[in-house]
Amino acid sequence: MIQFQKKYNKLFLNNIRKAIDDYTMIKANDKLAVGLSGGKDSIFLLFCLKLIQLTYIKDFELVGIHIDLGFPMNMQPLKKYCIENDIPLIIEKTNIADVVFHERKEKNPCALCSKLRRGALSRVAKEHHIKKIALGHNSNDVIETLFMNVLKVGKLGTFHPNSYNTKKDLSIIRPMIYIREDLIQSMVDKYNLPVIKNPCPMDKKTTRQDMKNLLIKLENIYPDSQQKILSSLSNYNPKNLWKKAHKK
Ligand SMILES: Nc1ncnc2c1ncn2[C@@H]1O[C@H](COP(=O)(O)OP(=O)(O)OP(=O)(O)O)[C@@H](O)[C@H]1O
């Protein structure tokens, strides 16, 4: 059973509360679904949001949604964890893995998989009258996406902490933007949170891994670079960004 401990505040919970407040992520009476992949980030997010419900914003509903991509995965530990903590878990079966690897034989399967998975997640949320989904992106993900955009696309920006899709009437929130990946790993190990092995053949072989390595090198030279890059995302003067007279 998830229970609050005072030391959580300093370790991670203050930063979760700060992200929620900085970007008005959760309000009273929200019905909020956590996208659960089976991985460490989303299970830690579930753990944190349950603690937020116990200590901070008490009157919101919390559920988990897992999109089954069609890989063989033993979801039993996750199901058990959700039952023990009184969190309803929705598991939606799909054939996304089959579409990506066999039907379309994608050269870049991650992009298509992520698009189909996001679509399935929104559809299932809608079917259950859920208008807010929380994803387990952490501060490393924020920076890796920024690096990918700048270095591979030539575009400045990363995903937003709280984005609203008017067409779908759906918000996507990311309460772990201030939490480092290495901290998540150590907390998941320490508190024995149920992580399900990912059988995807592309796991950790993506461009994202190159950006991860780049960030590690950067932190060796500038130890507080994560902190500085994160704060620069909301600390800019629009006048210093270039606006061309005509956009080609
Ligand atoms: N199959 C899935 N079903 C539901 N939500 C998912 C699924 N896969 C990913 N997500 C959600 O999207 C987020 C980002 O997905 P991504 O594949 O980048 O995972 P990640 O950063 O490795 O996180 P995790 O450790 O939770 O797998 C996850 O943290 C999770 O909230």
Image (spheres, grey):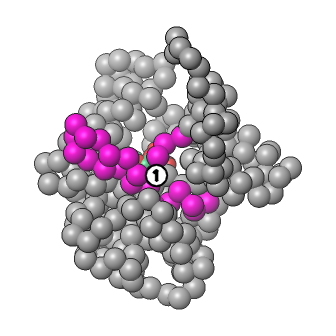
Provide the secondary structure element on which disc 1 rests.
Answer: loop
Give yes or no for residue 25 being in the magenta stretch.
Answer: no
Q: Residues within 10 Å of mark 1 (few under 14, many from 20)?
A: many
Name which residue lies at 71% across and 54% down.
228
In this image, 195 relative to 61: left or right?
A: right
- Most frequent secondary structure within the magenta stretch: loop
Name of the residue lying farthest toward the right: 221
Residue under numbered circle 1 = 161
The answer to which of 2 and 230 lies nearer the viewer is 230
Q: Quadrant of residue 179?
A: bottom right
Name which residue lies at 34% across and 65% down.
26
Label 1 sits on what residue type? Pro
Residue 61 horizontal/vertical position (percent): 23, 69
Residue 193 horizontal/vertical position (percent): 46, 69
The answer to which of 75 and 163 lies nearer the viewer is 163
Residue 92 horizontal/vertical position (percent): 22, 47
Count of numbered circles in the view = 1
Q: Is residue 126 visible?
A: yes
Name of the residue lying farthest toward the top: 248
The answer to which of 42 and 61 lies nearer the viewer is 61
Vertical placement of 228 versus 215: above or below? below
Name which residue lies at 63% across and 51% down.
235
Name which residue lies at 59% across and 20% down.
244
Q: Quadrant of residue 43?
A: bottom left
Q: Is mark 1 within 8 Å of ligand 1?
A: no
Q: Is residue 74 visible?
A: no
In the picture, which quadrant includes the N terminus? bottom left
Vertical placement of 126 versus 187: above or below? above
Name of the residue lying farthest toward the bottom: 6
Residue 83 horizontal/vertical position (percent): 26, 73
In this image, 97 relative to 239: left or right?
A: left
User: Which region of the structure is painted magenta?
Assistant: 158-181
